[in-house]
Image: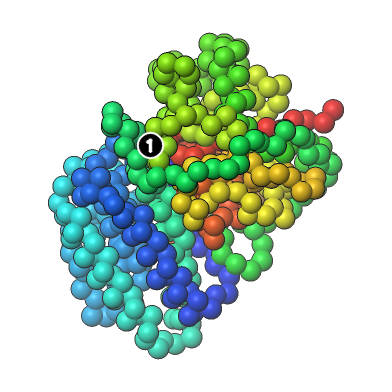
């Protein structure tokens, strides 16, 4: 999802097979719950090259299970439709050809009904596959692949929402996807600074549980003393940056960022609409007032960096962010809330920062690259994580469109620095002199 589309590289820990099978069913149901109320037209259109039609996400997640679990494991395998192997492949060159990503919206056929039939077909075959007895080693491999497929589908659940939001925002009627519930959290915590001493720190995933390969191997980094903001930057604070001329001051911007902002005509975050009396914002609940105490979201890395410079601060490195997130609770907003929008920060209980997990992905200053000692896994599932480790920046923490069970402090998301359609926000850091 730069995780332009997905990360699909396993390093699962031990898993209980019945629990995995239950999670498979739950995740598949959760995906289809996201399209309730959408029309076939809603699911067919592609609003920009980096987004995909909802119909394509529904098919691609099924293609994953068919291609990587059903086909290798069944000597009598017959594909649901041979054409789907190309149409719904994403980036797996070792699997075969792929249909052009920018043209996925041209695929009026297969229709939504046939895609949903494909999902039902794959689910039935997966039930039969998981019910079969298999040698212990084969079963371990199957469960590892199943875990990857579950995690992969959760990534596409978030992409369904972000891509749908971009699509609906282009409609002058500003249609709502789902009505938002009233939010009783109206004031954000005053920003404070949490201090972290200098020293060596272990970074990366190590231990039981699932992690993608780009979260490993665990390694040591020496960090200088730093401070991290206690919460994410709010709309109120970002509005002050705009009012102070932040988009008109080249001295605040990286050269590439200034050029990108000028080319695109940026004057505010994505989905902010200047109307009489001030800004309004488009959400998946439709067009509404800009809530000043919510975390600012849909900003690019370039905007986040410029804001930080104007604030006399900087963006954290991903190692600093991870150190601060250790022990973080799931106190943010996730997709299960049904809000599909970030909420103001909760009150702090102690000295630790809040809202580290959920609400908005937080830009870091770290380039997306391999950890020391990284080796891409063998086979198709390890094909391309390494090849994306160039020209993208790391984000951490998850968002209001991320499933709660999908996120952890070591999770590394990544996007190009000009990306704005994801729920991307800002948390400040600064050096301790």
Q: How many marks?
A: 1
- Which residue sits furthest left? 109
Quadrant assignment for the C terminus = top right
Q: Looking at the picture, does residue 88 appear above or below residue 307?
A: below
The answer, for residue 221, to whether it is visible in the render is no
Q: Is residue 139 visible?
A: yes
Q: Position of residue 276 (x, y in %)?
A: 42, 16
Residue at 67%, 38% (x, y): give it: 231
* Residue ID at (50%, 29%): 290
Q: Is residue 258 left or right of residue 26?
A: right
Say whether residue 410 is left or right of residue 95: right
Q: Is residue 172 above or below residue 75?
A: above
Residue hosting label 1: 286
Quadrant of the image occupied by residue 121 = bottom left
Visual colour scheme? rainbow
Q: Describe the element under mark 1 as helix, strand or loop.
A: strand
State the residue in front, 27 or 430. Answer: 27
Left of 345 or right of it: where is 350? right
Give the vertical position of 210 relative to 284 (above or below): below
Name the residue nearer the viewer: 80 or 381. 80
Q: Residues within 10 Å of mark 1 (few under 14, many from 20)?
A: some
Q: Residue 300, percent across and down? A: 50, 30
The spot of residue 305 in percent (x, y) is: 60, 26
What residue do we see at 65% from left, 19% from top? 310
Residue drawn where x is 58% and y is 43% of the image: 184
Res 35 → quadrant: bottom left
Q: Point out residue 247 in the picture as x, y percentages from the top left corner.
A: 53, 15
Is 394 displayed left or right of 181 in the figure? Answer: right
């Amino acid at each position: 999802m730069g995780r332009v589309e997905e990360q699909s590289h396993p390093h699962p820990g031990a898993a209980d097979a019945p629990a995995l099978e239950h999670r498979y069913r739950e995740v598949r149901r959760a995906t289809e719950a996201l399209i309730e109320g959408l029309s076939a037209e809603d699911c067919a259109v592609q609003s920009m090259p980096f987004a995909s039609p909802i119909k394509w996400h529904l098919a691609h997640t099924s293609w994953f299970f068919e291609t990587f679990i059903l086909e290798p494991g069944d000597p009598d395998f017959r594909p649901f439709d041979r054409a789907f192997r190309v149409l719904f492949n994403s980036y797996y060159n070792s699997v075969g050809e792929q249909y052009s990503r920018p043209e996925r919206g041209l695929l009026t056929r297969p229709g939504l009904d046939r895609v949903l039939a494909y999902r039902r077909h794959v689910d039935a075959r997966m039930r039969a596959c998981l019910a079969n007895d298999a040698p212990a080693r084969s079963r371990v491999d199957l469960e590892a692949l199943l875990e990857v497929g579950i995690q992969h589908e959760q990534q596409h659940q978030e992409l369904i929402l972000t891509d749908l939001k971009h699509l609906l925002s282009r409609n002058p009627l500003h249609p709502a996807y789902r009505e938002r519930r009233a939010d009783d959290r109206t004031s954000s915590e005053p920003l404070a600074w949490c201090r972290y001493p200098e020293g060596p720190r272990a970074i990366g995933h190590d231990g039981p549980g699932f992690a993608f390969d780009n979260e490993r191997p665990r390694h040591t980094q020496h960090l200088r003393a730093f401070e991290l903001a206690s919460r994410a930057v709010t709309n109120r604070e970002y509005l002050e940056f705009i009012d102070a001329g932040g988009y008109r001051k080249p001295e605040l911007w990286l050269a590439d960022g200034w050029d990108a902002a000028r080319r695109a005509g940026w004057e505010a975050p994505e989905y902010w609409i200047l109307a009489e009396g001030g800004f309004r914002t488009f959400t998946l609940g439709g067009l509404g007032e800009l809530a000043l105490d919510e975390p600012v979201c849909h900003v690019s890395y370039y905007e986040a960096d410029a804001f930080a410079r104007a604030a006399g601060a900087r963006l954290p490195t991903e190692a600093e962010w991870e150190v601060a997130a250790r022990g973080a609770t799931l106190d943010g907003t996730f997709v299960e809330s049904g809000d599909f929008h970030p909420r103001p920060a909760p009150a702090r209980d102690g000295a630790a920062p809040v809202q580290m997990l959920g609400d908005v992905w937080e830009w870091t200053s770290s380039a997306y690259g391999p950890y020391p000692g990284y080796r891409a896994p063998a086979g198709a599932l390890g094909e391309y994580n390494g090849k994306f480790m160039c020209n993208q920046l790391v984000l951490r923490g998850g968002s209001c469109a991320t499933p709660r069970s999908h996120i952890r402090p070591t999770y590394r998301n990544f996007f190009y620095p000009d990306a704005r359609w994801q729920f991307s926000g800002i948390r400040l850091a600064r050096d301790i002199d």
